[in-house]
Structure formats: structure tokens, C-alpha cells
Amino acid sequence: MVDPIFDYQFRLILIGDSTVGKSSLLKYFTDGKFAELSDPTVGVDFFARIIEVQDGTRIKLQLWDTAGQERFRSITKSYYRNSVGALLVYDVCNRSSFEHIPLWMMEAKRHIEPHRPVFALVGCKIDLVGTDNKNGARREVSCEEARMFAEENGLHHVETSAKTGMNVEEAFVLVAQEVYNRIQTGEYKVEDGWDGIKTGFNRPNGMDFNLLEAETVQSTCC
Amino acid sequence: MPSSDSDDFESADEGHGSVDKKERKKRLSSSNYSDNTVESDQESKKSAGAIQKKIEEPKKKEEKQTDGWDDFDIDDNEAELKKDSQTNAANTAPSKKVENKPSDNQKANVIKKQSEAKNPIESTQDTGWDDFDDWGDDDTSKNDPSSKPQPTQQRQPEPDIKAVTDRLAEASNKSSGWGWGWGVDSLLSTATAGISTITNQVSQGISTVLETGIGAPDPEELARRAKDNESKPQPNRSEEPQKTENDPNAGDAFQLGSLLSGVTKFVESTGTKVIAGGLDTLETIGKKTMEVLQDGDPGLAKKRAMLGLDAGDKPVLSQVLREAKSRADEEDRVKEEKREAKEVHYENLFDDFEGLVHLEALEMLSRQVSMRIEERLRSAEPDKRQDIKETLQQVAELCEMPEEEDEEEESEDISKTEAFHERLLAATRDIGVKLQFQSLVKQYTEALDWLSADSATEKTVYKRAVSSLAQATALAVEVYHKTAEMLLVKPRRSTADESDALTQMTVVLTKHISELATLFTEKLNTLETENKDQVNIYITNIFLEAGNSSTYIQNAFQLALPILQIGAV
């Protein structure tokens, strides 16, 4: 717990097929470590990290790491509701994990409604694709088609490696920045009874400032 | 819409007032523009009787008056007439005017004239600025025509109020041109203040241009030019009297209050000077200025605040800087305090250890499962429904916390942490899912290790106590959450065993919490301290937070109840 002060808390959820690397991605993002072996996630696990967006605003990301296993599907769907962002995770060396992405996205949209989350398409295990990797797996999802899908659906796309750390940070910052931007434009608000976005209770002024801003915008000339 | 346009223009023109007045002061030895007004008002009062007569034939009066100046055509338009007379007055040498006045003096007409045409009188006094005065006269003549028709009608009952109503009526006329309604009186003054500079510059510029164009101020030439100028803005002016007549503003206007005192001054002094000079130009400038002023500042709120500051207590830079610094210091201090407070704030710590989010996730599951149970109840046959209800009740009873049991004697050959782990495993032996207690055991071990270390102050012990309680509780809640998830995906349910196991586990966990609290308070009591009161406060708080922890744990257990129940129905 380095500086615990933050301005906002965003709740992001990671979804995708089993074994695509959701937990590893989160472990690297929060601990900077890569675990060669890890148990499959039961239900949902939690991670947290504070990052800064472009204007220096401190955001605590509360990350919900859902189980990809089919048997937990009925449970994990009850966890979507309070998310403001969703990372759709697939394995670049696993074709079917990419093909299931539209289903995951639909599922998330349906359960997060009426809220509209920020989505990001995150390819994992990019380190396995390396050219000089003798026993490396073959890439089954090209960067181009993933990017195309992302563009069609208005998502950000990024390919990552939880082993080398490549783009791991970027994947989360991307989503956080987008959520923050939507707060700035007024598309997202802090709402009672919805925990997607919360203000950090360590910065009481944060709230007032927003109210002030909002007032300026709302005021009209007689 | 020429009328509204001209209104706009006039409003913008009002801003001209203050500067214009100053200008006049410069020009006129008679400082007393307002004095004049009073005087002439009194004069008109004195001659009320005469005025009465005059009103019977207002037009004749005008004719008579103008008749004196045979150089010019007589126009039926009152404004025109008025102007003519003024222009004449300006053109004639002051001596002439002075001669003229006494000659007509017996007639109330002239007094009336004076009272109405204060400006011309002033202008005529000013000999050095003939050409400029033409503009000044236009000014007033523009002012008057709008007011004049009204007075002639209204003077009968209350001639002394006339001047006031005139101004009010005019002002209201003008302000209505803004199209902003009446709520903007203060805005008006602000806006006009800004505009006045521009307007003034423009009007001066125009006069300069015209002066240069005219060349030497030959009175006759000037008069002719002035006449020419008059004919140009005529359509505008002829509209104005009409409007004034249509406008029943005299009554309304009294409600305007403070707005008018400000606006009237502008109205009085501004006049047609600018109209004749370049109505279109100023109109554009005025509109543009308002646009610029209002840009990104609806209602001019910011600028108003800014100007308000300027007018009132002006902030001193050093003061501002000092305040900024003290604010920054205050913020730092608050930040530091919060960081400090957070370190020993139970709820924050509980959140940091992810207890809150596990509790929340458990709650989500619990709610969803409850809904499923209700759905089953609704869809069940009536006789079955009762069975289901009974089953639900039975499960709930199974999960009631047992009365305090006697502490089992711990075997001496295993450590506290091992014993704790053993009890947890024993309690949940029959639950049918594999539960992980390692994190709880590990945390317990760390707490015990820390307590056995020597270097500790009251404060660090207290901090560690709260933190340990929060962490143990968070880990316990996580166990309930995980258990609930696994029970939900468990293929074959055994509700009775599960209920018993969770109840036993709850007993073990709440005991564990009290154990932790006791260990830390004992540690506090062993410390040598001068501040016994503080230590007592710490001890009280630790037990308080321990109670808090037990509540969280039992809440988590209650949230798990529907998950146990659904396995049975």
C-alpha cells in the first residue's frame, strides 16, 4: 500500500475462455510477476492497483478476475453488473478463444445494462509467437483480424504478454483513460447504487469540483 | 425588424453615457447637467399653468418656436422640429440665443422648451465646438423625440413627474430591446460598461471624420449639413415616437427600480449623437461585443464577478498568494491526516484487504440465489410450496449460532496456528468442497510473530491490532465467498452437512477474532507506559473493532444461507 489516496475507483471485469491468461495478466499488472503455474480461478478473484491517467488523476482499478471455466458461468454472470469496463481476453494461439469473444461481449453487454461499459480486446501470450521460439505455439489469431474486429465493434485492441510484460500496463491504462474521458464528457457519472465508478473517499474535494464543473455547463442564460 | 435593431443599438449606446458625460463636463463650464434638469423642472412647474395652455396646442407651439428660425422648413414631425430648433440654436451664436430667450420669455413655450431641451441649452453655451455640438444636439434631439409625444399627453395631470416618466419610459423602451427580459438589470450595467468604450471611440471617430470632411466650421454650411444629416436617420426617428406611444411603459417602468437610475443616465446623455454618425456600424459593434462578452460565459456570470471584484474590495496579489499557500498547506495537512487516519481506519483496511469486495460479491450471489428460490416458490404447486417453506426454515434453523460452548482443551504439543487450522478443517470436514485456509493461518502466524517481537510502542501495537483484525476478517469473508461459489457448482448437495459445517466454521472464526483481540490487548498491557488513558482507549477500540469483525463474519454467514437453502429445494 504505497500512497493509498485516489480520486476514483473504476471496476473492471476480465472475461474470456478458460486458460487464456486472465489471471496471469492481472498478476503481472498488480505484482509485476509471472506465475508459470496457477490454479484455475474459482468464481471470481480480486486484484487492485492505483494508476494515473493523463491529467494525473489517480484511479484505483478494482479488477474482477472471473473464472473462465464453463461450470462457473452461471455464477460469474452475476458479477458483471457493477463494471464500468470489460477486458475481453483471448489467447493469440487459441483460435476458439478468439471466436468466443463476440459471445463474451454480448453476455457482458446484457448483464451490464443499462450501463454501457468500455470494452477492450486483449490478446494474451504474444510471447509464444516469437520467431526464434522453437517450441513456440503457432499464432492462430492474426493481429489484423483482431484489430478489424475491434474496429468494427468500437473497441480498443492490444496484444500482450504476461511473461515479458509487453503491453500489460497499456491494456489497463487504455481502458482506465477511456472511462475517465467519458467521465469528463459527462457520459459516465458516479451513481448511487452502482459501483462501476466511485469517488475516492480520501479526496472529498473531488466530488465538489465535479459538481462545480457540472453546474457551469448546465447554467443557461435567462 | 428595424425597430428591434434600433433598440439594440440604443441599448448598446447607453454605455456611452458615462464617458459622454465626462466629455461634456470637459466641454461645459456649467458642470450641472443634472442641476439644469432640476432647474428646468422647477421652471416647468412654475409655469404649469402656461403649460396647460400650451398643451392645448402643442404643435402650434412648435411651429411658433420654429417660426423664429425662418431659415428652415417646418416639418410636421415633432422630432424633426425639435431638431431643427436645436440645430438652429447651435448654429446661432450664443449671444443671439441669449437675446432670443428673453424675447420669448413671456411665453411659457420657451420655458417649456428649455426644460425639455436641456442639452441644447448647454450646447449653445459652448461656443468653441460648434461642429461637435451639432452631434451633441443630434444626440439630444434623438433623445427627445421619443419622449416628447408622451409628455404632451401626460403632462396634464402631473407635469412635474413628466421628466421622470419620460426617462423611465425611454429606458424601458430601450431595455426591452435586449430581449432578455427584466431580470438582467445588473447585467445591463456591466455590459454597457464594456461597450461604452467602444461606442465612445467610434462616435468620436465618426465626429472626427465628419469634422475633417466638413472642413472649416462655417455656421451656415454646418447648418445645412446638419440638416442633411437629419434627413438620413429620419425613418428611424419617426419610428421611435410611435413606439413610445404604443408602449404603456410609464406604469411598468416604475417597477424597474434600480435599473433605471443607472440606465437613465446613459439615456439622457447619450442621445442621437451616435445614431446620426453611423447607426449600422455601432449596431454591428454592439452586437458583436455582446457576443464576445457572452462567449463561453452565459449570463456574463464570470465577467460580472470579475467586474464586481474590481469595483469592490480589490484583491491584493500578495494576499492571494498567501491564501493560496495556506490553502496548499492545509491540503497537505489534511492529506497527511487522512493517510494517517486510514492506516488505523478499520473499514478502509478491510477494503484494502479485499474484504469489502468479497462481501459484495457474496451479496450479489446471495441475491441472485434468493431470487431463484423465490421463483421456485412461486412456480411450485400450493401444497409443495409449504414443503419448500418448511425446508427453507429448517436450513435456517440449522444455521443458527450455537450457544457459547466450552473451550476445548488444546493439546499442548501443537502450535496455536496449527490448532487453529485443525479446528477449521475439522469444522468443514463434511462440507463436500475443498476449502483453503492457508491465508488465514499464515496471517495468524504473522500476527503471532509480530507480537512476540519486542520493539513495539502502544501506537504500533494498536495499529497492528486493527490491521490484523481487518485482515483476518477480510480473509474470513473471502472463505465464505469462495465456499458459496463452490457450493453453487457442487454437483451433489448435502444441505444438512453443509449447514453444520458453515456454522461450525463461523464459531471457529469468531473465536479466532476474539483470540486476536485478546492477544493484542494483552500485549498493550505488558507495555510500560505513562499514558495509561491512551492505552485504555486503544484497548477499548480493539475490542470494538473485534466486535465489528464478528459482525462482518456473521453477515457473511447469513449471506451464504440462501446458497445452502437452494441445495435443499
Image: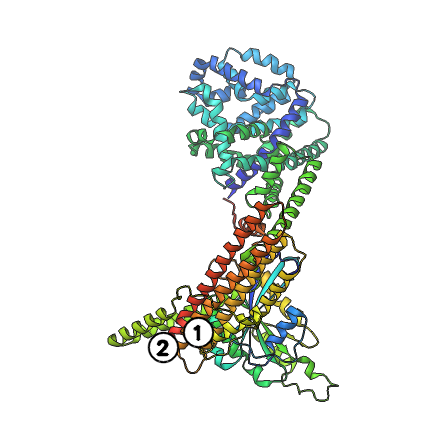
Instruction: Give the CA separation, mark 1 to mark 2.
Output: 15 Å
Chain letter belonging to callout 2: B
Residue B121's image quarter? top right
Instruction: State the residue in front, B170 or B370.
Output: B370
Q: Residue at x 53, y 37 (%)?
A: B235
Against B270, is A139 above or below? below
Residue neighbourhood size for the residue with mark 2, other residues' Cα within 10 Å, grouped as few (<14), some (14–19), many (≥20): some
Colour convention of the picture: rainbow
Left or right of B25, for residue B553: left
- Residue at numbered disc 1: B501
- Amino acid type assigned to the residue bearing label 1 in the image: Ala
- The image shows a total of numbered marks equal to 2
Residue A118 placement (x, y as % from top left) = 56, 68
- Residue at numbered disc 2: B568
Q: Inspect this view and state whether residue A2 appears.
A: yes
Instruction: State the residue in front, B177 or B244.
Output: B177
Instruction: State the residue in front, B217 or B366.
Output: B366
- Amino acid type assigned to the residue bearing label 2 in the image: Ala
Mark 1, secondary structure of its residue: helix
